[in-house]
Image (cartoon, coloured by chain):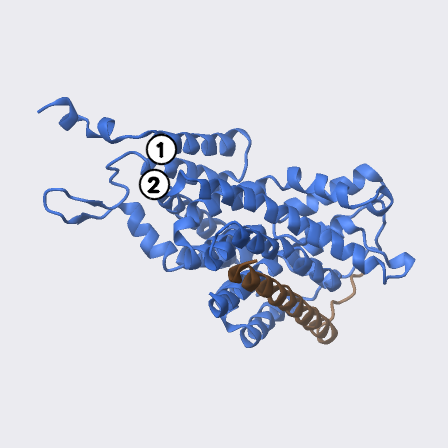
Chain colours: A brown, B blue
Amino acid sequence: MNDITKAAIEITGLGMAGIFLFMVIFYFVIKVIDKFFPAKPVSE
Amino acid sequence: MNFEQLFPVLYLITWQHLMMIAVGLVLIYLAIAKEYEPTLLLPIGFGAILVNIPLTSALTQIDPETGKALEGALSIFYEAGIATEIFPLLIFIAIGAMIDFTPLFKNPFLLLFGAAAQFGIFFTIIAATMMGFDLKEAASIGIIGAADGPTSIFVSSRFAPELLGPISVAAYSYMALVPIIQPPVIRMLTSKKERCIHMDAHPKVASRAALIIFPILVTIVAGIVAPSSLALIGFLMFGNLIRECGVLNKLSQSAQNELASLVTILLGITIASTMTADKFVNWQTLMIIGLGLIAFIFDTFGGVMFAKALNFFLPANKKINPMVGACGISAFPMSARVIHNMGQKEDPTNYLLMHAVSANVGGQIGSVVAGGLILALIPLFA
């Protein structure tokens, strides 16, 4: 395995971890927004 | 004056030029007859013809008598719109104005599939380095797996502008082929029982304030965590804010229609300016087309396997249909529709559309985040 492929594997680890981190943060962003600005219940 | 001086093109044209003209014709055929991403593939196809006729004035040529450059329109568009990254960023505003984030508020947990289904990008980066591409080229090829044309163009125009043509063609072609690529991969990875899993409905809606605050907060958070991703995420969220604010309906409509149409025409035909025979007719192009397919297959693999892994930890009544994981790619709403139809075929009482759309919207965010992260990470290693 050459050095470039080793770097690519490292980038894969960091990249996937980074995307999940972002998504987890966005998940909490949505939860917080939803808590403070909940949707009004739709009347029947 | 002899025949050669009268018709120099006939003496300069090579089989490579003819091959590229044939490629252009095939792309136009696919766009019109098969309706494969016609808004992009038709301009790219026509542009490929335009730039592969020798001495074309659409590209900058050197005047043999004076030695001066005679500027070509497509070369000017390339320098002004692609090299500066302005065209893809304008498209992001248009896409942002088209996205409705409401499905994410129904079930934000499905955002995670927008992360898992980016696996194909990174798997392909590794594969490309094994095939001899350097890290910047490999990253540009891997980003085909974002299933998001503008992100692919944005990243490859920065890291490997010489590969922009084949990367764009691969990205848009495979996006159009999602209904053909995803189902066999999903069937191979899942059992019938898994494909029949029903998921609870979330009838919730989001408030207007929430939808306005979301793009602003996402931009700020993305800026704090990874400032290099801000151009991508920021323009997308700006377009979305125009849509959701409720006071710029005219601008929102313009962004979704006129801006999207104008920039798409320019983007398509300008990308074609990179598809000259000398740059396109080589083994590298074939490898890129093959790697693009691998990227889409492993995106689907990542999303499905992540759902299957989650199901180990979820109670029986909360299990996720693993097919929904495959919707974590950015091809919206095609992927969601494909999964919903697959679910209906397995069990006509199973309505997966709402969950699939949520995961698919997550994929739209995930692909842009992936692009931003690649822009940040590659310079650290290259």
Seen at 54% across and 34% down, the residue is: B35
Residue B270 locus on image (x, y percent)? 37, 46
Residue B3 locus on image (x, y percent)? 15, 22
Q: Does residue B89 sit above or below B301 in this rendering?
A: below
Residue carrying label 2? B278
The C terminus of chain A: image quadrant: bottom right
Indicate the chain on which mark 2 is placed: B
Residue B312 locus on image (x, y percent)? 85, 59
Residue carrying label 1? B16
- Please tell me in which quadrant of the rendered image residue B217 appears: bottom right
Frontmost residue, B68 versus A44:
B68
Q: What element carries label 2?
A: helix
Mark-to-mark CA distance, 2 and 1? 8 Å
Seen at 16% across and 26% down, the residue is: B4
Seen at 38% across and 37% down, the residue is: B48
Q: Is residue A3 left or right of residue B108?
A: left
Amino acid at pointer 1: Gln
Circle 1 packing at 10 Å, graded few (<14), some (14-19), many (20+), is some
Amino acid at pointer 2: Asp
Tell whether label 1 touches label 2 (CB within 8 Å).
yes
The N terminus of chain A: image quadrant: bottom right
Q: In this view, does B225 lie to the left or right of B182?
A: left
- Please tell me in which quadrant of the rendered image residue B15 appears: top left
Tell me, yes or no, if residue B205 can be seen here: no
Q: In this view, does B61 lie to the left or right of B291?
A: left
